[in-house]
Image (spheres, rainbow, N blue to C red):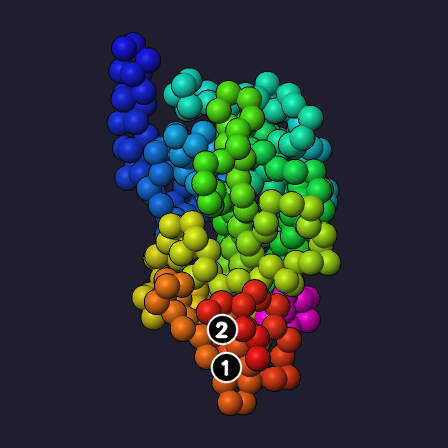
Amino acid sequence: MRQSICAILFAMWAWSAWSAAPTCNGHLIHGIPSQSDQLLCRTGYALGYNYSRKTADWVAYRLTPDIHDDGNVDRQNDFRVDTELPAIYQTTPADYVEPVFDQGHLANSESLDDTITMNSETFLMSNMTPQLPGLNSAGWKGLENRERKWTDNRGELFIYAGPLFEGGLPSFIGNGVPVPTHFWKVIYDPAAQEAIAFIFPHRRVLTSELSLLLVSVNEVEIRSGLNFLTALADTTEETIEQSQPLTQWTGLDFPSAPVSVVLDTRPHSQACCKICRAGKACGNSCISRSNQCHQSSGCACDG
């Protein structure tokens, strides 16, 4: 009973945080992806925590060249319990004392190293998810490297990341910590008013495969139940979120936007992709024959 009362009081306090600090040091100025069970505002990032899953629904952080500069502080490596969470919903480093999974960062420690406090806060266990080393140290890390390179060219970026739990019941490690089936990342450039998004299957992924994982922001929203960029005008938000780049950003294409397609974002059971007369089906959309399809087939095969 005492634990239940404490949990209720924590929940009431957490809910008040949504109105007390809506932008979380500027990380949420473009909108809050969801009202999770508890909002955690850090120096370098914001996080929406899910009590039942004992993990973040999402993290969000503003990144600039000054924040991730190579001359900044060393990696703190101080993995520890997040005491701002109710004890019954906390995870601990002991949960990861098993032979398979890494303590995978959602808010990237190598990017957020402007101060000791900023970097240290990325090692709070609320920022961790079980992640296979073949993803954590390969494709996921490769995208983290790219986000820093893209800020060098583009300036300020806003980055969102989180897990997906799809299919049946998840597997667990430690004291009830679920293992995600996928991970996602959305990167928004407010100056160019464009975004790039990725969904990773939870397996070994090489950095060279990143272009195969490109999706629209809308697809991330549909599969995660989140809602990004809600502070933007509706028409602007819709245009950005429907656009799916066919190639990754490079250091050479700013300020022009990447080639993109607009996807049919209706639920899969309602969507019906067509093979265009002058193109072929790519997932749930049509593209020119001159472009290569990197998406899996939807309700029509690639033509």
Is the magenta region chiefly helix, strand or loop? loop
Q: Nearer the viewer, residue 208 or 231?
A: 208
Relative height, residue 226 to residue 20 (above, below): below
Q: Nearer the viewer, residue 207 or 38?
A: 207
Please tell me whether mark 1 sits on a helix, a strand or a loop. loop
Q: Look at mark 1 in the image and give the residue it sits on.
A: 275
Q: Quadrant of residue 265?
A: bottom left
Q: Quadrant of residue 36?
A: top left
Residue 286 locus on image (x, y percent): 50, 78
Which of the marked residues, 1 or 2, is nearer the chain's N terminus? 1
**Is 178 positioned to the left or the right of 250 in the image?**
left
Give the position of the N terminus as an image quadrant.
top left
Give the position of the C terminus as an image quadrant.
bottom right
Residue 250 sits inside the magenta stretch = yes
What segment carries the magenta color?
246-254
Relative height, residue 175 to residue 273 (above, below): above
**Is 124 positioned to the left or the right of 49 in the image?**
right
Please give the label number shown on residue 300.
2
Residue 56 sits inside the magenta stretch = no
Residue 201 locus on image (x, y percent): 59, 49
Circles 1 and 2: CB atoms closer than 8 Å: yes
Circle 1: is it few (<14), some (14-19), or many (20+) Cα within 10 Å? some
Q: Nearer the viewer, residue 118 or 4?
A: 4
- In the image, what residue type sits under mark 2? Ala
- In the image, what residue type sits under mark 1? Ile
